[in-house]
Amino acid sequence: RENFIHLCNPHLEKMKEDILYHFALGTGTHDFPALFGDVKFVCVGGSPSRMKAFIAYIAEELGLGSPGCDYPNICAGTDRYAMYKVGPVLSVSHGMGIPSISIMLHELIKLLYHAKCSNITIIRIGTSGGIGLEPGSVVITRQSVDATFKPQLEQVVLGKTVIRSTNLDEQLAKELMQCSKEIGQFNTVIGNTMCTLDFYEGKGRLDGAICLYDEEEKLQYLKNAYESGVRNIEMESSVFAAMCNLSGVKAAVVCVTLLNRLEGDQITSSHDVLVEYQQRPQKLVGYFIKKSLGKV
């Protein structure tokens, strides 16, 4: 059955042209069905260079590119986001934090709608701080929770607080977990992911410019988070889950942990180790895409 993107905005029907300003794309200047109509998998992550590396990796995995092949940035007309495509896979950067990924997702969802894409799977791949896990562990998010451990996104719209669900696709999480077992290269768990509004105080770190709590208070907070089911902390998953839910898109979050926050705040692993860690979500999602396309 064809499952098309659902747009929660009746006003778009009345627009003659839709300009995706932060992508430097528009329905009046680009043929969206021709450019993107075959997309089935969208992978998003914070860093433009990481998303370019991912598209090169998946191209080689799918046999659609050659080593050293360059992939042009579809959004080269702007410096806000970067976008790359190979075959049925789209790779897009989203920057850091809820506001940045929210802007990107509004335009990405409209892009997929205008392109008449169906049966889309969107996966966020990234890095995070772990809680009670060895560095290098991969967390597949069951649900995104806020800083009070509630599975919800609070957003103010027209001066009123709106609460949106942040659950993610349970079956997709199980499929990704099975893929990790088949790969058998790194520890992977399914758990809740805490999404914060800030990198320092919001995550209970002790190394920011401002910190008005002590180490004991920090550790108690993180232990409470662990007991509630939280296994990692990042800054984008809540709005990602909420917007994908509202648009009827199957979605997952797959993040590697760079450190165990119960043991410290600053990353001490070497550059080479961190590079290998950051490749783990790519490997898992790449394997999932290959398996979905019958190429495993």
Image: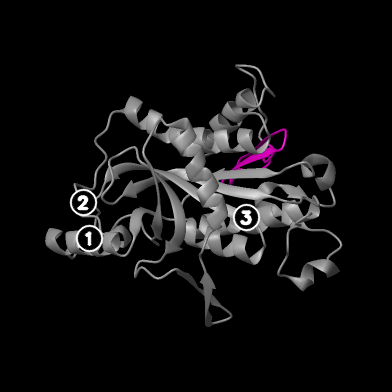
Q: Which residue is at the front of the view, 188 or 251?
A: 188
Q: CA distance from mark 1 to mark 3?
A: 31 Å
Circle 1 packing at 10 Å, graded few (<14), some (14-19), many (20+), is: some
Disc 2: which residue: 262
- Counting residues from the N terminus, which is met first, the one under dot 1 or under dot 3? 1
Secondary element type, mark 2: loop
Residue 270 appears at what percent x and percent y?
28, 28
- Counting residues from the N terminus, which is met first, the one under dot 2 or under dot 3? 3
Q: Residue 216 occupies which quadrant of the picture? A: bottom left
Q: CA distance from mark 2 to mark 3?
A: 32 Å
The image's mark for residue 223 is: 1
Q: Is residue 106 visible?
A: yes
Scheme of image coloration: one colour
- Counting residues from the N terminus, which is met first, the one under dot 1 or under dot 2? 1
Q: Residue at x 71, y 54 (%)?
A: 20
Disc 3: which residue: 250
The image's mark for residue 139 is: none
